[in-house]
Image: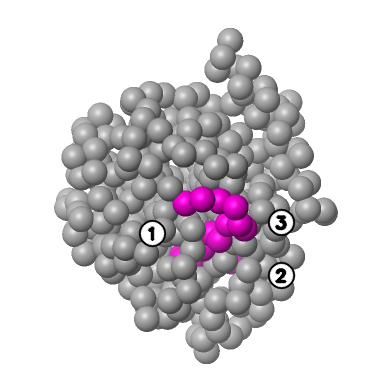
């Protein structure tokens, strides 16, 4: 176990992109129906999933902008924000911990365009170190997020991604100091294909260097398109799983990565492949979690519910959407893990980390987009703490 009498270094690699969010889009609307997927991997729209813009244009035979204007009524986005499963989680982690306790670093790239300049300007207003955020003379990644708050009662989103310069980011672009971190986060690497395809090698190197490894996933449309009925790969082989201290997936991703048909079989797959600890989220349903005791303290398979306090507040005053909830969940878990290490806990408590993840993901519903921009350091943690305290009472009642 790392002795934490110094500032923690948390580094993450993945995609940072521009999110353009359109709220209150009915997925059951008549104008929406022609663009829905008919079979897996065909490039059509599916609630809860991500597709690439280019594949969607092939599926429809029309320009993306034409279709976007049709389904949105030609209106402007309700919100433009920083997006990406890695960067949003890191921003939340840094905000929850504060710069006195940790250095949070992002490794990735951006394009030399207006979107890249937007991201750079916004990231400078966060506590994340972006010295390793490389500039290339190509297009910055972006995503159109369509949100239907009433879909299946719980709300859902559809993501149309333009991968841009993320295609060009390779393991060789990651400087060696990345592996001098205490915690390494590989966040949604399916949106950075050449990192994703080399994940086994990168995770192996991380463990050899003594790093704690966290992997959070995203819908892998590239492999879904290539082999819609095959198991999604995570790196070069299933050996990747044995190098992961904590794996965070949603239910859909868990089933695709394991090529199973239910959550229990998926958990068996991850346990068999020696994942140290696992968290499976499922929207507003209970999360499933376990730890084999190799890094976190042992935790037998169990379920944890969503926050009742968050749900009650949403019924009173719903003003945001669910975009970024999963990423903030991840950030809350990492922040709790880091805090526990900081005070010298020998075996971190995974259940405690999940509690911070649950209230962090829930709080994200109160605003649009994944990234929250603080007025002062510690603002976000101060607002989330009452939900943490109420959640502790909820599960201990």
Lower position in the chain sequence, tag 1 or tag 2: 2
Secondary structure of the residue carrying tag 1 is: loop
Secondary structure of the residue carrying tag 2 is: loop
Work out which residue is located at the far right of the displayed protein and give it. Answer: 375
Query: Which residues make up the magenta segment?
Result: 2-20
Residue 6 falls inside the magenta stretch: yes
Q: Position of residue 16 (x, y in %)?
A: 54, 67
Check disc 1 and report the residue beneath it: 210
Quarter of the image for residue 48 reads: top left
Residue in view at x 37 percent, y 28 percent? 299
Q: Assign the C terminus to one quadrant of the image.
A: top right
Work out which residue is located at the far top of the displayed protein and give it. Answer: 397
Secondary structure of the residue carrying tag 3 is: loop
Check disc 3 and report the residue beneath it: 100
Decide which of 63, 283 is in the foreground and name it.
283
* Label 3 neighbour load within 10 Å: few <14, some 14-19, many 20+: few
* Label 2 neighbour load within 10 Å: few <14, some 14-19, many 20+: few
Q: Is residue 41 above or below residue 323?
A: below
Decide which of 192, 230 is in the foreground and name it.
192
Q: Is residue 7 above or below residue 353?
A: below
Which of discs 2 and 3 lies nearer the camera? The answer is 3
Q: Position of residue 164 (x, y in %)?
A: 46, 76
Left or right for 316, reference 284? right
Q: Is residue 98 above or below residue 129?
A: above
Q: Is residue 236 above or below residue 217?
A: below
Residue in view at x 47 percent, y 51 percent? 2
């Amino acid at each position: 176990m790392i002795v934490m009498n110094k500032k923690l270094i948390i580094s993450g690699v993945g995609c940072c992109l521009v999110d353009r969010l359109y709220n209150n889009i009915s997925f059951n609307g008549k104008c929406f129906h022609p663009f829905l997927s008919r079979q897996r991997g065909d490039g059509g729209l599916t609630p809860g999933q991500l597709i690439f813009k280019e594949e969607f244009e092939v599926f429809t035979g029309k320009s993306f902008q034409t279709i976007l204007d049709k389904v949105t009524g030609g209106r402007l986005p309700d919100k433009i924000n920083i997006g990406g499963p890695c960067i949003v989680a890191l921003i939340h982690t840094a905000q929850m911990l504060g710069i006195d306790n940790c250095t949070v670093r992002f490794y990735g790239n951006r394009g030399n365009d207006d979107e890249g300049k937007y991201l750079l300007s916004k990231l400078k207003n966060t506590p994340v170190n972006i010295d390793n955020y490389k500039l290339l003379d190509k297009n910055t990644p972006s995503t159109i997020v369509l949100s239907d708050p009433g879909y299946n009662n719980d709300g859902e989103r559809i993501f149309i991604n333009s991968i841009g310069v993320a295609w060009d980011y390779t393991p060789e672009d990651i400087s060696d100091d990345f592996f001098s971190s205490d915690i390494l986060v590989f966040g949604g690497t399916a949106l950075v294909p050449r990192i994703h395809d080399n994940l086994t090698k990168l995770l192996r190197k991380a463990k050899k260097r003594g790093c704690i490894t966290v992997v959070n996933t995203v819908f892998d449309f590239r492999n879904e398109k290539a082999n819609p009925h095959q198991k999604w790969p995570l790196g070069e082989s299933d050996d990747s799983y044995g190098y992961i201290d904590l794996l965070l997936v949603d239910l859909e991703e868990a089933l695709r990565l394991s090529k199973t048909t239910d959550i229990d079989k998926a958990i068996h797959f991850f346990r068999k492949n020696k994942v140290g600890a696992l968290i499976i989220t499922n929207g507003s349903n209970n999360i499933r979690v376990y730890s084999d005791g190799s890094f976190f303290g042992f935790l037998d398979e169990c379920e944890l519910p969503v926050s009742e306090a968050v749900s009650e507040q949403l019924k009173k005053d719903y003003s945001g959407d669910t975009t970024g909830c999963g990423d903030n969940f991840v950030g809350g878990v990492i922040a709790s893990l880091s805090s526990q290490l900081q005070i010298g806990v020998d075996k971190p408590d995974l259940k405690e980390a999940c509690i911070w993840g649950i209230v962090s993901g829930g709080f994200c519903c109160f605003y649009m987009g994944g990234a929250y921009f603080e007025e002062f350091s510690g603002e976000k943690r101060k607002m989330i703490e009452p939900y943490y305290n109420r959640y502790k009472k909820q599960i201990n009642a």
